[in-house]
Amino acid sequence: MPDVIPVAMIPDPPLLPNKISDDQIVAWLVKAYNGAKQSRYPSSVYVKCISMHYNSLHACGCKLREYHIAPAAWAAFSIDLWKKAPNKRQAIAPITWVFNATMVLSRIELYEIDRLNYRGGQIVENEHSREIKRRELLMQRDLLNADSKGELAIDIKSRYFPGGLYEQLFKAAKRQAEIDQARLDEQAQRGDWMGW
């Protein structure tokens, strides 16, 4: 039996692409802000109209690009920082506080300390990988108790993975993990919120 069960993983949040328009830079920041805000304040409303903050958002996007910081990671970090701050006038961090070019410079050291908390790497299992894991756990339990019952390990293994079942499940898990990974990578590259 192979050791590593195939699963997909949430990719790291993407950096701003180099060749996008100013409007797209601002749109990425708004999307990142909405995703981070919604994940931390589920009943909050989405920000849509940002025309009066366009220039400051664009300037911040350029600063994030310069420092190689993913907008989604920065949004999540900033909102988490806001939640810890005493004496704030609003319950939810405004987009102009989260994405402020001057604040990027003043908060970058704090961000660097916390950066690993805003990355990908979370496992996304599929039904086949969960089934392998479930059967392996049951098999391990029975193997631990095998001596007291006089059962042979080979009999226990064949009970949980009869007739090539492990290989079938493994191949199915691998196929599904590849499909899931492609979908997750595409979503991340579009800037969709992925739970960072």
Image (cartoon, helix red, strand yellow):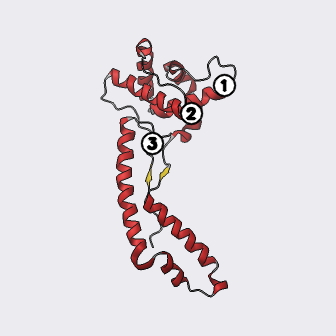
- For mark 3, give the secondary structure: loop
Residue 63 x/y as whole percent: 44, 24
The amino acid beneath tag 3 is Asp
The amino acid beneath tag 2 is Arg
Q: Say the numbered circle drawn on residue 85.
A: 1
Q: Badge 3 is on which residue?
A: 12
Quadrant position of residue 128: bottom left
Q: Is residue 4 above or below residue 160?
A: above
Mark 2–mark 3 distance (CA, rounded to whole Å): 19 Å
Mark 2–mark 1 distance (CA, rounded to whole Å): 15 Å
* Badge 2: residue crowd in 10 Å (few <14, some 14–19, many ≥20): some
| Image quarter hosting the N terminus | bottom left
The amino acid beneath tag 1 is Ala
Residue 110 x/y as whole percent: 59, 31
- For mark 2, give the secondary structure: helix
Q: Is residue 13 above or below residue 27?
A: below
- For mark 1, give the secondary structure: loop
- Residue furthest to the top: 52
Q: Badge 2 is on which residue?
A: 40
Work out whether mark 3 precedes mark 1 in sequence or the reverse, and give the earlier one.
3
- Residue furthest to the front: 43
Work out whether mark 2 precedes mark 1 in sequence or the reverse, and give the earlier one.
2
Foreground disc of the pair 2, 1:
2
